[in-house]
Image (cartoon, helix red, strand yellow):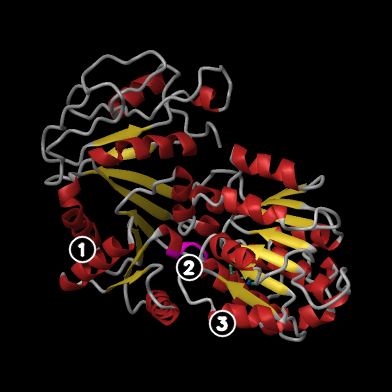
């Protein structure tokens, strides 16, 4: 399939060819014809799938070929809402590239910087605005933007915007847009109930396209959990990275400050590392990313927000130094590795504080995760994987503590070997709504127990819930 066959205008085709785009990606193949035909769209696609062009090309074609619907002075005709400054800038840059042969005045609007440039751009008059919700509300309140002429609205990474608490802002913005004759394109990696409700409220008979099965990760990724005391995570990270310093590794940390400190710590230990997060300037971020891609640094420490929208193609290893606060972000993080059938490793350093988050992740994925103690790093404080204390009997429909090899429930493994167990999704049928008992928290079983279960026809099913 070619871009021509999707019905795109020559001015876009020329720019795409120059950028080396030859074949539309699956989300582009599905979304572009529907969007060009004027349908509302609910599109399931995550970063890296080519989603920006999937909404950007039809949007630009509309702006470039259809006259402004409302009469009077120039008003913004298209609005893209994005959760972060990084993503907004990236979308803006991409759309500028695609519309190289067509002058479409545009502005990018986000917080954390002065208002001056944004006010100037809006005053000059633009057709296209790419905005983060918070700052856009500021402009609405100052009356520096008039959204009454919006013909196309894009919600990019809608799930992320809701996770970040932007739902009230989005609703306020939606109230300022024309209700009639508006096309709405909603892109999201996941579709929690809140997104479906938003779509029902604000979209007209949306068509649905989906390129990434919901909440799934590549089959070729090995997920491993390393239990460790919180105070020893750094040491363990160094140990893991030190096993082969050539492996390009993306390390996720919770905070900006934490990722800086971690990168500095790694550098001091002789590992070439860089940090990337929202407090870094655009040029610093680009440099860090470039160095990582070229192999000048082997470890990139990133926060979730900074890592979103970053185009890193194929990575052998992702390490969750901190688990994500939102289980869905695990899917985003891990989406960086195991692409196109390549093998990948997703390692999570998990302390007692993280046990609850891990349960949520395992439940979301609906698949096993190996729990492996590393000799010398076994936590002093045994991790309670479930609500019940280790050693207690399983609660019906509740949560079970893990069983470690070589011991009873919750005991440390004996001997020097790496202890192995599996966190699993518990009641998988319940996860799928099969028996109405609801979800169960992850628990773990030893390999011997699993072998026995399998011999008896039971045991963990790795294919459930995908
Ligand atoms: P996105 O998912 O929109 O962030 O895009 C991920 C990356 O894929 C970006 O670097 C795009 O420039 C690139 N890309 C998008 N569509 C295509 C395509 N059809 N052919 C080649 N590269 C593409």
Query: Can residue 270 be seen by looking at this rendering?
Result: yes
- Asked whether the beta carbons under mark 1 and mark 2 sit within 8 Å of each other, the answer is no
Image quarter of residue 249: bottom left
Query: Can residue 189 be seen by looking at this rendering?
Result: no
Identify whether 95 is placed above or below 359. below
Identify whether 333 is placed above or below 415. below
In the image, 68 versus 274, the foreground residue is 68
The question of residue 16 being in magenta is answered with no
Question: For the residue carrying disc 1, how many other residues have a C-alpha within 10 Å: few (<14), some (14-19), or many (20+)?
Answer: some
Say whether residue 68 is left or right of residue 346: right
Question: Residues in magenta?
Answer: 306-310
In the image, 116 versus 201, the foreground residue is 116
Give the mark, 1 or 2, whose residue is nearer the N terminus: 1
Q: Distance from label 1 to label 2 (Cα)?
A: 22 Å
Q: Position of residue 429 (x, y in %)?
A: 53, 23
> Residue 312, labelled with which disc?
2
> Residue 242, labelled with which disc?
1
Q: Distance from label 1 to label 3 (Cα)?
A: 46 Å
Identify whether 377 is placed above or below 58. above
Residue pictured at 80% horizontal, 60% vertical: 35
Q: Nearer the viewer, mark 2 or mark 3?
A: 3
Say whether residue 156 is left or right of residue 375: right
Residue pictured at 22% horizontal, 57% vertical: 237
Q: Position of residue 345 (x, y in %)?
A: 38, 53
Name the residue beneath numbered marker 3: 117
- Asked whether the beta carbons under mark 1 and mark 3 sit within 8 Å of each other, the answer is no
Give the mark, 1 or 3, whose residue is nearer the N terminus: 3
- Report the image quarter containing ligand 1: bottom right
Say whether residue 272 is left or right of residue 340: left
In the image, 144 versus 157, the foreground residue is 144
Image quarter of residue 71: bottom right
Main secondary structure found in the magenta portion: loop
């Amino acid at each position: 399939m070619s871009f021509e066959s999707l019905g795109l205008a020559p001015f876009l085709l020329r720019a795409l060819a120059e950028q080396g785009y030859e074949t539309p990606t699956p989300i582009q193949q599905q979304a572009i014809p529907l969007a060009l035909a004027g349908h509302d769209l609910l599109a399931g696609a995550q970063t890296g799938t080519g989603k920006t062009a999937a909404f950007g090309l039809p949007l630009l074609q509309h702006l470039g070929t259809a006259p402004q619907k409302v009469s009077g002075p120039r008003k913004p005709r298209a609005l893209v809402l994005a959760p972060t400054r990084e993503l907004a800038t990236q979308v803006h840059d991409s759309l500028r590239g695609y519309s190289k042969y067509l002058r479409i005045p545009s502005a990018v609007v986000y917080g954390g910087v002065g208002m001056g440039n944004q006010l100037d751009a809006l005053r000059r008059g633009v057709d296209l605005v790419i905005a983060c919700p918070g700052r856009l509300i500021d402009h609405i309140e100052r009356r520096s933007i008039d959204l009454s002429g919006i013909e196309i609205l894009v919600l990019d990474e809608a799930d992320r915007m809701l996770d970040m608490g932007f739902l009230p802002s989005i609703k306020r913005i939606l109230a300022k847009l024309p209700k009639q004759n508006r096309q709405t394109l909603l892109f999201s990696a996941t579709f929690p109930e809140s997104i479906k409700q938003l779509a029902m409220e604000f979209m007209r008979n949306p068509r649905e396209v989906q390129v990434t099965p919901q909440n799934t990760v590549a089959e070729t990724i090995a997920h491993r959990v390393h239990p460790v005391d919180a105070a020893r995570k750094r040491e363990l990270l160094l140990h893991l990275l030190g096993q082969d310093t050539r492996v390009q590794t993306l390390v996720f940390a919770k905070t900006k400050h934490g990722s800086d400190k971690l990168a500095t710590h790694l550098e001091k230990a002789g590992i070439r590392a860089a940090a990337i997060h929202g407090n870094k300037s655009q040029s610093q971020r680009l440099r860090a990313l470039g160095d990582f891609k070229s192999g000048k640094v082997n470890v990139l420490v990133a926060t979730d927000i900074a890592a979103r929208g970053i185009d890193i193609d194929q990575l052998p290893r992702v390490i969750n130094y901190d688990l994500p606060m939102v289980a869905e972000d695990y899917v985003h993080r891990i989406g960086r590795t195991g692409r196109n059938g390549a093998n990948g490793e997703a390692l999570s350093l998990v302390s007692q504080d993280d046990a609850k988050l891990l349960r949520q992740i395992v439940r979301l994925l609906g698949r096993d995760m190996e729990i492996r103690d590393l000799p010398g790093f076994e936590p002093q404080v045994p991790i309670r994987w479930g609500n019940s204390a280790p050693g207690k009997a399983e609660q019906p429909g509740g949560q079970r503590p893990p069983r470690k090899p070589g011991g009873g429930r919750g005991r440390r493994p004996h001997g020097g070997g790496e202890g192995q167990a599996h966190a699993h999704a518990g009641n998988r049928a319940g996860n799928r709504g099969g028996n109405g008992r609801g979800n169960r928290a992850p628990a773990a079983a030893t390999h011997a127990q699993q072998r026995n279960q399998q011999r008896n026809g039971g045991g963990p099913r790795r294919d459930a819930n995908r």
